[in-house]
Amino acid sequence: MSTFQTEEEQVEALKKWWQENGKSVIAGVVIGLLVVGGGKAWIEYNRVQAENASAFYEGFSQAARAGDLEKALKRGEALIQEYGRSTYALFAALELARLQYEAGEKDQARERLQWVLDNSGDSSLQKLAQVRLARLLLDIGDLDGAEKLVAEPAGDAWQGELLAIRGDIRLARKDPEGARKDYATALKKGVSTPALVRMKLSELGG
């Protein structure tokens, strides 16, 4: 507007601009209001969903702590079905995997862990599921499947755990030298059970 010389020219230009752009401005304002309102509605929806998922998880957790596998399965599966994208569902799946493994339902436990691995957007939960799944596969004799999960341990807080599992796999494949190297490196990187890994390393002459 500063390019116009007189007030009349500015008013006339403003009228023409409004005729050409007024509808789109109104539409933009309306859309903006809808977005703001929708954003608030979305936040409220997520809050309610989180509260509901939390309540579901509490019921599941109580059944799990009581050792009631049947009730825990029922509540955990309901939580996963209704709130599958929530962190509560991921924790429930991890706990269900443990319960089912202890009950001898190893195939079901494997499916739970794979589901967490496939659906978690949290890297820590993914790594936890990866470690547990690799151990489970090693336990049931699926060395190839376990090896794929620990083939290239990333340089993070979980590297030691993955290397220790890789050492177990190499030992199962009759490769004591490779196992010894993995155990030694795992101890340097840090593991949750250092005494156990040191014992395995000692038995191999490390």
Image (spheres, helix red, strand yellow):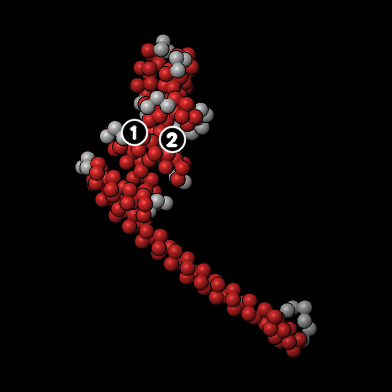
Looking at the rendered structure, the secondary structure element under dot 2 is helix
Residue 121, percent from left and from top: 47, 46
In terms of sequence position, does the residue under pointer 1 or pointer 2 come before the other?
Answer: 1
User: Residue 106 shows which numbered tag?
Assistant: 1
Q: Does residue 146 lie above or below 79 as drawn?
A: above
Nearest the viewer among 105 and 170 is 105
Q: In the rendered image, is residue 149 in sight?
A: yes
Residue under label 2: 130
Q: Looking at the rendering, which quadrant does residue 46 occupy?
A: bottom left
User: Residue 128 shows which numbered tag?
Assistant: none
Residue 185, percent from left and from top: 47, 22
Question: Image check: 180 left or right of 51?
Answer: right
Which residue type does callout 2 highlight? Gln
Nearest the viewer among 198 and 20 is 20
Q: Looking at the rendering, which quadrant does residue 119 occupy?
A: top left
Give the position of the N terminus as an image quadrant: bottom right
Looking at the rendered structure, the secondary structure element under dot 1 is helix
